[in-house]
Image (tube, grey):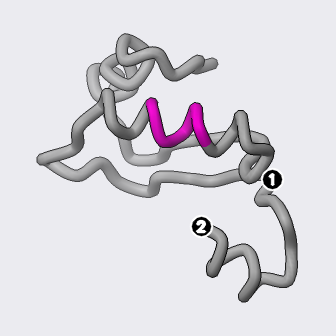
Amino acid sequence: MENSLRELHTDRIDLLLIHRPDLLMDADAVAEAFTQLRAAGKVLHFGVSNFTPLQFDLLASAGLSARH
């Protein structure tokens, strides 16, 4: 993440979007990574696109605070 932020000439991203879920996605790992990035102030908000309601709920059940 640090290299990406440096390349973008910024210290944080306002919105990080997962465009499409991976079939092998580990929802717990994604939720933990998002939590750590938010806590470190690297990313303010997270979003998803092209997720089914079930996939969205899976992330929410893993502890990722989600809003529809």
Q: Which residue is mark 1?
A: 14
Q: Can you give x and y, in whole percent of width and height, for residue 4 in the image?
A: 64, 78
Q: Which residue occupies 22% across, 52% down?
A: 22
Magenta residue span: 32-36
Q: Indicate left or right for 60 with 1 as reference.
A: left
CA distance for labels 1 and 2: 14 Å
Q: Which residue occupies 51% across, 22% down?
A: 64
Q: Can you give x and y, in whole percent of width and height, for residue 9 in the image?
A: 85, 83
Task: Tell me if residue 16 is in the magenta stretch.
Answer: no
In this view, 2 is above or below 17:
below
Q: Which residue is mark 2?
A: 1
> Considering only order in the chain, which callout, 2 or 1, is on the residue closer to the N terminus?
2
Mark 1 closeness class: few <14, some 14–19, many ≥20 residues within 10 Å: few
Q: Can you give x and y, in whole percent of width and height, for residue 58 in the image?
A: 31, 20
Mark 2 closeness class: few <14, some 14–19, many ≥20 residues within 10 Å: few
**Circle 2: residue type:** Met
